[in-house]
Amino acid sequence: MSYYTGCELKIKIPADRAKDEDAIRKALLEKLPGVGIQFISSPDVRRPSVAEAIVPHNHPMAGMKRQDFGSTEMKPVAGETLLGIASDVLKDF
């Protein structure tokens, strides 16, 4: 079982870049094995971008939290982490 199984990414791609879906999927799965990927064609975007990153509550990443300086509150960061990794991969496209 791959670590990111159960996590989901929604990727916006320009309507004229649908042919790049396979290459983008391959690159994302190399970095995030097991992640679910859904492509959304959008005339509003010029480059592929992450529209949404979802980490289910029962996933091991869901427990990731950070505490901001001067605060006692712990904030969940699993979705942000997944979004950051995926966004980094998409820079090559």
Image (cartoon, rainbow, N blue to C red):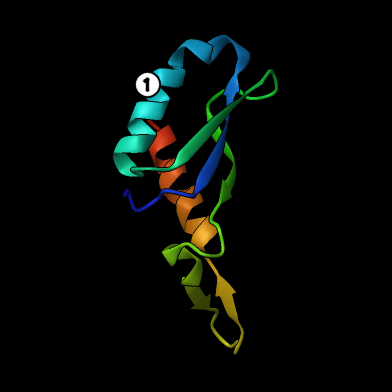
- Provide residue 83's location: percent of width, then percent of height: 50, 49
Q: What's under tag 1, amino acid-wise?
A: Ala
Residue at the image point whose x is 55% and y is 34% from the top: 49
Name which residue lies at 32% across and 48% down: 2
Figure quadrant of the C terminus: top left
Q: Pointer 1: what residue?
A: 23
What is the x, y in percent for residue 65? 50, 74
Percent position (x, y) of residue 46? 59, 22
In this view of the protein, can residue 38 be seen by the observer? yes
Q: Secondary structure at mark 1?
A: helix
The correct choice, above or below, for 47 with respect to 84 in the image is above
Foreground pick, 12 / 5: 5
Is residue 93 at all visible to an observer of this figure?
A: no
The quadrant in which residue 43 appears is: top right
Could you say where residue 57 lies in the image, as x and y percent from the top left?
56, 64
On screen, residue 74 above or below 54: below
Q: Nearer the viewer, residue 36 or 72?
A: 36
